[in-house]
Image: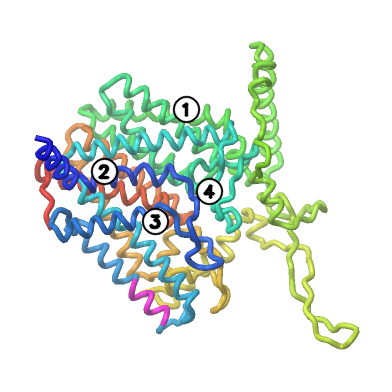
């Protein structure tokens, strides 16, 4: 009997191995901080992390299962993903031997190959997830893990904001060494992610799924729990102070409410009432949280008011009144002033704040400067090389500080936007025009000269980055893959007369993907590791669900 039980257990584990491993990755990748294991390229910001090792091990398991015909390569997206992999490889070869935008030096070649392989690593999770799902119950398991993971991310964000829980950032190379930091009062929350932009993109992906679940569940207690999670997630989005992600989330939530209304068996008037009701609830919730916690987000969004003195003054007066009411008047009237003071938590000893490290990393000029962008708070001088002749007649090079000058775009739109308009986006477009079919290769768009080694690569527009690195062919293959996944999700939604679990999940995925595409206009979200991993995991879940729903309640996996 013992031997029989052991055999049954092994058979069950063999059958469900990929399911359990994938569920673990779905939780582990967002929750585990971005702590590096080792450098893969000296001086580069991208490092090998524990999730890379775990994913590599999972890929090996999946390949073994494919050979044993217990997992599959056949999916609705396989041909498009294969096309992208082939085009990406051709782009790499083109950058070596045709455009010659990547010098044949180990460091430069290694960096380009690293980015190519990382893109394949992201996509590998789609195949693994698709193969692991055999029934709707498997999808339900994944969705529960996803909701629990998002809860963990929000709770860690609360601890980070108010309890000085550790911050592990990858916003620059010094941070990315795994340095333990803590947040100051106005620092942007990053939770378990490497930066507030990455966290905000993950929330863009998550909130639509939480909202649609709250709108469609029939269980009262579950509905209240989901609305509570939605509120926490909205708070986390606001304190991350990412403007583009905030706008992208609003777009995604509008899509959720409208698609949910279309599945109501009601007249047009009743559907419009439903949209108005749910939109008002979500809108008031966002407004209340922005008023209470959105100082940093509001300040960033209202940078444009610098050129409108009356509006700017009105906002400052409103903000001052709000602060007085929430932090002085109400606590005093309720007798909570001393209680709030006693609950205040002090910063940990022998720890470094994000502000302190920023200050240590730059040499700042404390002289007041009046002509600088609205989002520049410390004037950092330019360091330039000046050739001169010494007293002995020697030619020497001196490093000299000069006042920093800013472009018209920086003064008009802020430094962050000006960097995109003046440098990053034109360079990406130049990469595309250099080779319209295959681009100039991965990690080539931020260089100002051929042999320059940049410690990080970002275009702050995923569309332009894909176009510049892999050309029109790579662009069509990559975003064509996403379009095919959206089509699969749309088919599930279309076939559901009412929003059952399958329909709700498809709505959440469609809205989340639209939100990410909006966010991709200003951030490279599809190469942000935690976001990209989670996105392709969810894509595998939704595409597998489409197959399960179409054919039968269960699906037999074959190669």
Spatial separation of the CA atoms under disc 1 and disc 2: 36 Å
Image position, residue 127 (x, y; %) = 25, 55
Circle 1 SS class: helix
**Residue 405, quarter of the rendered image:** bottom right
| Image quadrant containing the C terminus | bottom left
For image coordinates 13% across by 57% down, the residue present is 69
Number of residues whose C-alpha sits closer than 10 Å to that of mark 4, classed few (under 14), some (14–19) or many (20 or more): many
Magenta region = 89-96
Spatial separation of the CA atoms under disc 2 and disc 3: 18 Å
Q: Disc 4 vs disc 3: Cβ atoms closer than 8 Å?
A: no
What residue sits right under mark 2 in the picture?
Answer: 20
Is 505 placed above or below 34 here?
above
**Residue 13, quarter of the rendered image:** top left
What residue sits right under mark 1 in the picture?
Answer: 285
Image position, residue 187 (x, y; %) = 62, 41
Say whether disc 2 or disc 4 marks the residue closer to the N-terminus.
2
Compared across the picture, whether 31 is left or right of 543 comes to: right
Circle 3 SS class: helix
Compared across the picture, whether 306 is left or right of 192 comes to: right
Is 526 placed above or below 555 here?
below
Number of residues whose C-alpha sits closer than 10 Å to that of mark 2, classed few (under 14), some (14–19) or many (20 or more): some
What residue sits right under mark 4 in the picture?
Answer: 195
Say whether disc 1 or disc 2 marks the residue closer to the N-terminus.
2
Number of residues whose C-alpha sits closer than 10 Å to that of mark 3, classed few (under 14), some (14–19) or many (20 or more): some
């Amino acid at each position: 009997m013992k031997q029989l039980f052991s055999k049954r257990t092994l058979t069950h584990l063999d059958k469900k191995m990929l399911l359990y491993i994938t569920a673990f990755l779905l939780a582990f990748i967002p929750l585990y901080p971005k702590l590096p294991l080792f450098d893969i390229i000296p001086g580069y910001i991208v490092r090998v992390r524990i999730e890379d090792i775990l994913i590599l091990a999972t890929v090996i398991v999946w390949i073994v299962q494919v050979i044993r015909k217990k997992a599959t390569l056949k999916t609705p997206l396989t041909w498009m993903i294969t096309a992208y992999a082939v085009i990406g490889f051709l782009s790499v070869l083109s950058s070596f031997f045709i455009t010659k935008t990547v010098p044949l030096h180990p460091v430069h070649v290694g960096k380009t190959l690293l980015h190519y392989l990382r893109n394949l690593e992201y996509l590998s999770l789609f195949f693994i997830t698709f193969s692991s799902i055999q029934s709707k119950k498997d999808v339900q398991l994944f969705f529960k893990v996803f909701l629990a993971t998002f809860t963990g991310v929000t709770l860690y964000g609360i601890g980070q904001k108010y309890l000085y829980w550790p911050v592990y950032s990858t916003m620059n190379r010094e941070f990315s060494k795994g340095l333990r930091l803590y947040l100051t009062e106005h620092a942007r929350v990053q939770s378990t992610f490497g930066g507030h932009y990455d966290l905000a993109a993950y929330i863009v992906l998550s909130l639509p799924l939480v909202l649609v679940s709250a709108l469609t569940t029939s269980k009262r207690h579950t509905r209240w729990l989901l609305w509570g999670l939605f509120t926490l997630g909205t708070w986390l989005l606001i304190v991350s102070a990412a403007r583009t992600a905030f706008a992208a989330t609003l777009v995604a939530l509008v899509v959720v409410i409208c698609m949910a209304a279309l599945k109501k068996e009601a007249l047009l008037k009743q559907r419009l009432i439903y949209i108005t009701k749910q939109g008002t609830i979500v809108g008031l919730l966002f407004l209340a949280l922005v008023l209470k916690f959105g100082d940093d987000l509001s300040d960033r969004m209202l940078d444009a008011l610098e050129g409108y003195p009356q509006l700017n003054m009105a906002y400052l007066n409103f903000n001052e009144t709000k602060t007085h009411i929430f932090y002085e008047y109400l606590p005093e009237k309720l007798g909570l002033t001393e209680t709030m003071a006693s609950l205040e938590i002090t910063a940990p000893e022998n720890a470094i704040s994000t502000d302190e490290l920023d200050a240590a990393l730059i040499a700042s000029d404390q002289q007041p400067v009046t002509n600088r962008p609205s989002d520049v708070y410390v004037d950092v001088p330019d360091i330039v090389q000046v050739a001169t002749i010494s007293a002995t007649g020697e030619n020497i090079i001196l490093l000299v500080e000069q006042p920093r000058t800013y472009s018209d775009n920086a003064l008009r739109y802020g430094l962050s936007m000006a960097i995109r308009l003046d440098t990053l986006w034109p360079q990406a477009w130049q990469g595309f025009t250099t080779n319209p079919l295959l681009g100039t290769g991965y990690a080539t768009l931020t260089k100002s000269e051929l042999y320059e080694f940049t410690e990080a690569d970002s275009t702050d527009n995923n569309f332009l980055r894909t176009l510049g690195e892999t050309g029109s062919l790579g662009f069509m293959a990559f975003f064509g893959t996403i379009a095919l996944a959206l089509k699969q999700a749309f088919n599930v939604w279309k076939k559901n007369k009412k929003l059952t679990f399958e329909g709700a999940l498809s709505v959440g995925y469609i809205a989340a993907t639209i939100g990410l595409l909006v966010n991709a206009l200003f951030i490279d979200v599809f190469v942000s590791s935690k976001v990209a991993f989670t996105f392709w995991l969810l894509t595998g879940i939704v595409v597998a669900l489409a197959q399960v729903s179409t054919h039968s309640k269960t699906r037999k996996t074959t190669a």
